[in-house]
Image (cartoon, rainbow, N blue to C red):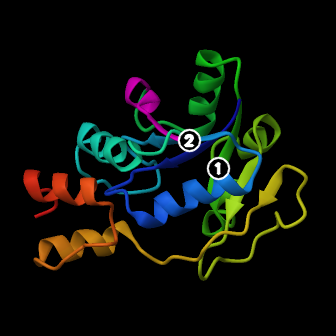
Amino acid sequence: MKIGLFFGSFNPIHIGHLIIANTMVTATDLEQVWFVVSPQNPFKKNSSLLHEFDRYDLVSRAVADNALLKVTDVEFHMPKPSYTIDTLIRMQEKFPQHEFKLIMGEDNLAQFPNWKNYDKILEYVGLYVYPRPNSAPHNFKNHASVKFVEAPLLDISATYLRACLKSGKSIRYMVSEPVEEMIRLKKFYL
């Protein structure tokens, strides 16, 4: 199978993530999209990061009703912080029968050359890129290993959702019902 890997902290997962994943799996040659829950992003501080197992559970709940979307905890079993290239190598070792593609927002392309072994990522798997508002200029528009995929522009951020939760505001419709239920039940992000 050809599988898109969608990395993120998903802190929490929201409808923007789900719409991107669904668009990738229904509008491209990808047969599934796997959410790779990252315990720690090497470029982000983790001050408000929910525990990785809780974030994994939220993603599991969010994708439970769609057989084309899966979640993996592969990075939970790797040194932290984990780097995308190392995870890609691990995934290929674990699942040699699959071909993987990296799903990324266009807003990450300007910084992509700063990633560990970014050139190897391009060579090894290639990128499926979705549009993001206010993306910085980059040099990947005509790169053979980068495929741009038209997808809805949604500017929902996990930071905004956490702020809403902290101040007692509703996050209804911005996350799936099972995710909202678990967040409320476990009093996450308060």
The residue at the far bottom in this view is 134
Q: Residues within 10 Å of mark 2 (few under 14, many from 20)?
A: some
Dots 2 and 1: beta carbons under 8 Å? yes
Q: Is residue 104 magenta?
A: no
Q: Position of residue 100 (x, y in %)?
A: 69, 35
Q: Secondary structure at mark 2?
A: loop
**Whether residue 128 is visible:** yes
Q: Secondary structure at mark 1?
A: helix
Instruction: Tell me which amino acid carries mark 1.
Output: Val
Q: Residues within 10 Å of mark 1 (few under 14, many from 20)?
A: some
Res. 53 image quadrant: top left
Residue 78 position (above or below residue 62): above
Residue range of the region highlighted in magenta in the rendering = 69-78
Q: What residue lies at 63% left-to-right and 49% top-to-bottom?
A: 115
Q: Is residue 71 magenta?
A: yes
Name the residue carrying label 2.
Answer: 68
Q: Position of residue 105 (x, y in %)?
A: 61, 63
12 and 77: which is toward the camera: 12
Res. 167 image quadrant: bottom left
Q: What residue lies at 72% left-to-right and 69% top-to-bottom?
A: 150
Instruction: Tell me which amino acid carries mark 2.
Output: Leu
Name the residue carrying label 1.
Answer: 25
